[in-house]
Amino acid sequence: MAVELTKEERNKLMGGPLAAAMAMMAVDMGIFSSAQEAMALGRELAGAAGRYASNPLISSLFDPEALKQGIQPQKLAVTPEDVRDGKVLDRALEEVDGAVALARAKGDAASAQQYCQLIVEGCEAVAAAAGNGLFGSGEKVSTAEKAALDRIRKHLGVSSTSV
């Protein structure tokens, strides 16, 4: 039982996990770690259709035929001041809230909650992808990343999955 999604709805739903992950990347920015974190997010999202095969909302979101049309989620609107002031997560959660509201409108409560879980899993993958040392070595999840993950989990009502 698929959920019908317009291209705009698909873009908005894809924007939720991407905005949250971008905020996680901004918590502990580094040239090498950002590349590792982006690849980890890509792997996490690529496996979502399989992990959530019984979820009609997520299955429809990652439908291969629909994805061939491409996705263009709205870019997270942040300024350099937002990054310096630690407001990136605030902006990301605003974007996430819009995506979650759409998920709740398009799917049942269980599907929407799994969508929230998907967002958290993407953030956890980003946080665990690289350490804060040279070339991404060292402690994988910094104190700042743990705090951001806790805030995202609490905001979405999702328990920890791995980190």
Image (tube, rainbow, N blue to C red):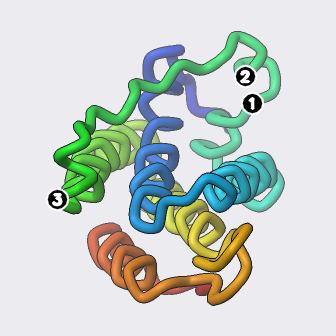
Q: Amino acid at mark 1?
A: Asp
Q: Secondary structure at mark 3?
A: loop
Task: State the quadrant of the C terminus.
Answer: bottom right
Residue 4: % across, % down = 56, 24
Q: Is residue 87 above or below residue 76?
A: below
Residue 161 as seen in the image, left or right of residue 134: left
Q: Give the crowd class for mark 2: few <14, some 14-19, many >=20 residues within 10 Å.
A: few
Residue 101's disc is none
Instruction: For the residues labelled 1 and 2, say whether their Cβ atoms are less than 8 Å apart.
Output: yes
Residue 59 as seen in the image, left or right of residue 6: right
Residue 14 as seen in the image, left or right of residue 106: right
Q: Secondary structure at mark 1?
A: loop
Q: Is residue 51 above or below residue 91?
A: below
Q: Secondary structure at mark 2?
A: helix
**Residue beneath label 3, please?**
85
Residue 63: % across, % down = 75, 30
Residue 77: % across, % down = 27, 32
Residue found at the far top of this picture: 69
Inter-mark Cα distance, 1 to 3: 38 Å
Q: Nearer the viewer, mark 1 or mark 2?
A: 2
Residue 63's disc is 1
Inter-mark Cα distance, 1 to 2: 6 Å
Residue drawn at 20 percent across, 48 percent down? 82
Q: Amino acid at mark 3?
A: Asp
Along the line of sight, which residue is nearer the eye, 88 or 55? 88
Q: Of callouts 1 and 3, which one flags the residue occurring earlier in the amino acid sequence?
A: 1
Q: Of callouts 2 and 3, which one flags the residue occurring earlier in the amino acid sequence?
A: 2
**Residue beneath label 2, please?**
67
Along the line of sight, which residue is nearer the eye, 86 or 147? 86
